[in-house]
């Protein structure tokens, strides 16, 4: 008999160092990939990994928020927390995808947008707001996948597409369960209880239509191929719709949250 | 042992707290003390022009010549049934006279007809609940339909924790309604008032064609304490004040509250 997996177990699994890295995931789904850099305004946030790739014969733009594989990378990437220049880079490349009619795949593993003084000076809130309003109207197929942590507005910034998926071991929430317990109950030790109350597991999210599909964890060649095929299939499906139809469906998807 | 009761500081504190506080006011920004009546009708500090926090209805009175509210009855969905939350909602509804954290409607500013929304910071810190998002979405939809500009005053601590991920989804829902309004060539003026933070800063508050604020308004994404804990340093005192955002290019103009109506009237007339 298998032990029932609690919401907090999902949180731990989503954060696990064993979780497949975004870079490996991109290498696995793309037959070829070129990373592109810079926001053309201020910098090149290493927390945002983005570029153009080929899935079969289909060119796609990939934007992602990635954690580091070691301490040094994690320091540079703020443990997967993007700064405004990261969101600006992602948005620049998404608009480019729109220009060249390339589908967009957003891969998300972030505890949230970086809370820092410079991030505030450079308009963290403004850039997320722009990612939302400009991202949601892009005419090309736009698929977002929560790979590990989907932390608040920092994750939502890249998750306003036609379809939002989540890995089996992922969570998506307004804040961390630690933060939730501290703010609502003034007791950070009640983190397990908070995780359960927050309805942040893929199963909960699916029932609320926040996500459209739960993706099995990618950990070997077989599961990678499955993931790649699922993406290809979804891109084809979205491409078959007219732009008007796609945008209408997308509008309805977000309009229904009431 | 002294048979008489000795004086206690707690007694003194209790007595002092009974000194009527309605005579003197201390400005939280410049720390100057002045007579309450010096706040004037616009409730501004006479020294630094900081606009003291006011409720939504009071704001409407200051700005509009006419106002008809819509969606007054729209409340938080019943599925959020945590007893503590339900109790809290009942309490703030009584205090604010509102069923939700934003008052929306159609109004007139110096003869200019427009859609108007005002968030009320007293309503669970102006947090973005599902019904808050729904009211703002409908405000933009209605204004698009009637071909009207929108003026929205924001005041919010961010997402409403008690409503979880539904609160986050409001940021997307409102954003697309703002986008639709913009696609019709209509003007949206966002006025960021004290405090505008979190998910509201990271969505509709920052999506206006014109972004206004009042002197010394707190505007930010992440909370000061979260930043302190993350960077292990104390951030500069004014790093999230309107003046800093203006300097860094994230606001169009800081307007004293007493002049807000005339500035809005001009901007509406010139568009």
Image: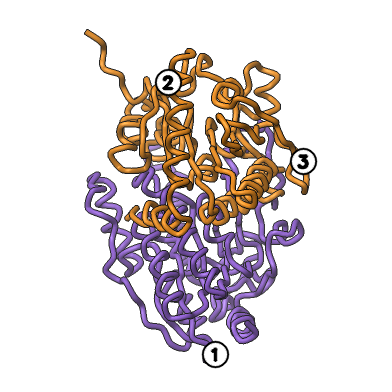
- Circles 3 and 2 on the same chain: yes
Q: Which residue is mark 1?
A: B110
- Discs 3/2, front: 2
Query: Which subunit holds the residue at mark 3?
Result: A
> Which chain wears orange?
A
Identify the residue at horizontal 64%, vertical 29% (top origin): A78
Query: Which subunit holds the residue at mark 2?
Result: A
- Discs 1/2, front: 2
Q: Which residue is mark 2?
A: A217
Q: Nearer the viewer, residue A226 or B233?
A: A226
Query: Which subunit holds the residue at mark 1?
Result: B
Residue A249: image x %, image y %? 39, 54
Q: Nearer the viewer, residue A17 or B25?
A: A17
Identify the residue at horizontal 47%, vertical 59% (top origin): B176
Q: Could you tell which of marks 3 and 2 lies nearer the N-terminus? A: 3
Residue A192: image x %, image y %? 35, 25
Query: Which shade is chain B?
Result: purple
- Which residue reaches farthest front? A57
């Amino acid at each position: 008999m298998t032990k029932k997996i609690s919401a907090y177990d999902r949180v731990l699994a989503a954060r696990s160092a064993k979780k497949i890295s975004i870079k490996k995931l991109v290498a696995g789904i793309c037959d070829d990939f070129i990373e592109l850099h810079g926001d053309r305004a201020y910098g090149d946030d290493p927390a945002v990994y983005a570029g153009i790739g080929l899935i079969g014969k289909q060119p796609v733009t990939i934007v992602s928020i990635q954690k580091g594989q070691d301490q040094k990378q994690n320091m540079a990437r703020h443990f997967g927390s993007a700064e405004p220049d990261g969101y600006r880079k992602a948005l620049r490349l998404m608009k480019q995808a729109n220009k060249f009619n390339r589908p967009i795949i957003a891969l998300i593993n972030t505890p949230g947008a970086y809370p820092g003084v410079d991030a505030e000076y450079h308009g963290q809130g403004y850039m997320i707001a722009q990612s939302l309003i400009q991202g949601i109207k892009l005419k090309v197929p736009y698929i977002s996948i929560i790979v590990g942590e989907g932390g608040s507005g920092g994750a939502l910034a890249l998750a306003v597409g036609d379809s939002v998926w989540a890995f089996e071991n992922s969570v998506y929430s307004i804040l961390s369960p630690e933060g939730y317990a501290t703010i609502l109950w003034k007791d950070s030790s009640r983190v397990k209880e908070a995780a359960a109350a927050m309805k942040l597991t893929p199963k909960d999210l699916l029932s609320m239509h926040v996500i459209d599909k739960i993706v099995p964890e990618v950990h070997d060649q077989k599961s990678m191929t499955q993931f790649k095929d699922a993406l290809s299939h979804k891109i084809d499906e979205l491409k078959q719709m007219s732009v008007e139809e796609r945008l209408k469906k997308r509008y309805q998807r977000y309009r229904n949250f009431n | 042992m002294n048979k008489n009761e000795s004086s206690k500081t707690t007694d003194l504190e209790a007595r002092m707290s009974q000194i009527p506080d309605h005579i003197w006011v201390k400005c939280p920004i410049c720390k100057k003390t002045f007579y309450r009546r010096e706040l004037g009708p616009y409730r501004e500090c006479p020294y630094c022009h900081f606009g003291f926090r006011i409720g939504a209805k009071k704001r409407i009175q200051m700005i509009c010549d006419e106002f008809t509210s819509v969606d007054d009855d729209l409340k938080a969905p019943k599925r959020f049934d945590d007893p503590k939350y339900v109790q809290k909602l009942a309490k703030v509804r009584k205090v604010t006279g509102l069923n939700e954290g934003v008052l929306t409607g159609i109004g007139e500013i110096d003869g200019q007809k427009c859609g108007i929304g005002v968030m009320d910071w007293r309503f669970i810190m102006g947090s973005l609940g599902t019904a808050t998002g729904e009211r703002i979405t409908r405000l933009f939809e209605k204004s698009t339909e009637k071909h009207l500009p929108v003026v929205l005053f924001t005041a919010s601590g961010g997402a409403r924790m008690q409503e979880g991920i539904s609160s986050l989804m409001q940021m997307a829902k409102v954003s697309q309604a703002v986008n639709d309004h913009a696609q019709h060539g209509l003007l949206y003026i966002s006025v960021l008032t004290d405090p505008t933070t979190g998910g509201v800063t990271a969505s509709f508050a920052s999506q206006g064609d014109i972004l206004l604020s009042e002197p010394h308004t707190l505007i930010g994404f992440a909370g000061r304490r979260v930043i302190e804990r993350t960077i292990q340093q104390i951030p500069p005192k004014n790093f999230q004040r309107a003046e800093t955002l203006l300097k860094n290019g994230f606001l169009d103009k800081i307007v004293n509250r007493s002049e807000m109506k005339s500035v809005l009237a001009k901007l509406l007339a010139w568009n």
